[in-house]
Image (cartoon, rainbow, N blue to C red):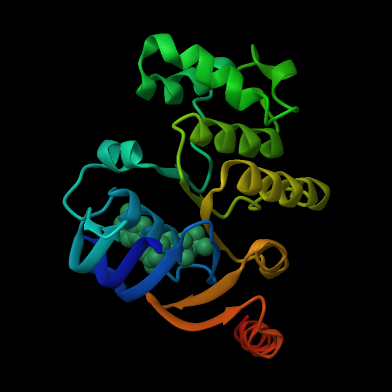
Amino acid sequence: MCVLELQGIRGGYGRINVLDGVSLSVGEGEFLGVLGHNGMGKTTLMRAIVGEIALTAGTLRWRGQSIAGLPTHRRVALGIGYVPQGRRIFPLLSVRENLLFAASVHGRREAARVVDEVLADFPALPRLLERPGGLLSGGEQQILALARCLCTRPTLVLLDEPTEGIQPSIIEDMVVLLRALRERHRLSIVLVEQNLDFLRALSDRIVVLEKGRTVREARASDAAAMAALVESAEFAG
Ligand SMILES: Nc1ncnc2c1ncn2[C@@H]1O[C@H](COP(=O)(O)OP(=O)(O)OP(=O)(O)O)[C@@H](O)[C@H]1O
């Protein structure tokens, strides 16, 4: 069963069209990787799914129902979580306050309990709870952004280039963390990235986005198709 299904979506910024008929689906519990170089529309695709930009054509369905007309907060309430590129941490709020802000979607009483539950999955965070978000390292901010997203209790997580600006050893930790979170919470995940090794380490399936269209696709279980996709991606890069 598909949790998310996009068909022929188009959209962009004013007269600038970026998404040029993107179609893709995400299965229950699936980890979908979206590979694309700079400017191919990866962030725009994420923003269209969460409702930060409006579609000009196509359909967007969540568990079979159209969500194209819903505002972002309603999509979050349905279970769509978003970790944006650049992380968007509130720099002057403490780590705890960043988490409480997201968890407040469950009401003020519940928020503290949800934050405690989420922290159990992130051993790096408890010692940082009172530190302003802006003083964390890039890697710590990325972990915080992921934890903050989980505070809304999503069943689908959209991750936009989490490895950007992060050192290799932390990227390896991120692979381990994402695998564990996926397993523990039975998450569906869409990861958009330029880092092919990171995508391959995590994804059940990879689609390639070029100029606002999905142009190729391969399953991790199909070694020949994946090798062809990698070769074409490396050639293009
Ligand atoms: N707010 C905006 N207004 C106008 N054009 C924009 C805006 N944001 C992005 N664009 C343009 O849309 C196109 C796709 O951008 P997008 O950020 O979706 O690409 P991307 O694949 O995420 O790239 P990157 O890997 O560099 O983040 C680019 O040409 C970009 O310049």
Q: Locate residue 229: give its quadrant.
A: bottom right
- Taking the image as shown, residue 137 lies to the left or right of residue 64, namely right
Looking at the picture, does residue 197 appear above or below residue 82? Answer: below
Q: Quadrant of residue 199?
A: bottom right
Residue 67: percent from left, percent from top: 22, 53
Q: Quadrant of the C terminus?
A: bottom right
- Farthest residue toward the front? 1
Number of disc labels: 0
Query: Is residue 2 visible to the viewer in this orientation of the structure?
Result: yes
Image location (x, y in percent) of residue 234: 67, 83
Frontmost residue, 237 versus 103: 103
- Residue 29, image x and y in percent? 53, 56
Q: Is residue 128 left or right of residue 18?
A: right
Can you see residue 94?
Answer: no
In the image, 62 versus 124, the foreground residue is 62
Which quadrant would the N terminus be assigned to in this image?
A: bottom left
Residue at the image point whose x is 36% and y is 24% from the top: 105
Q: Where on the image, by quarter, is ligand 1?
A: bottom left
Q: Position of residue 166 (x, y in %)?
A: 71, 48
User: Residue shown at 44%/31% (left/top)?
Assistant: 152
The residue lying furthest to the right in this view is 169
Q: Quadrant of residue 205?
A: bottom right
Instruction: Determine whether 198 is above or below 233 in the image.
Output: above
Residue name at image x 47 percent, y 45 percent:
84
Q: Is residue 170 left or right of residue 52?
A: right
Residue under the point 56% across and 36% down:
145
> Looking at the picture, does residue 166 appear above or below residue 25?
above
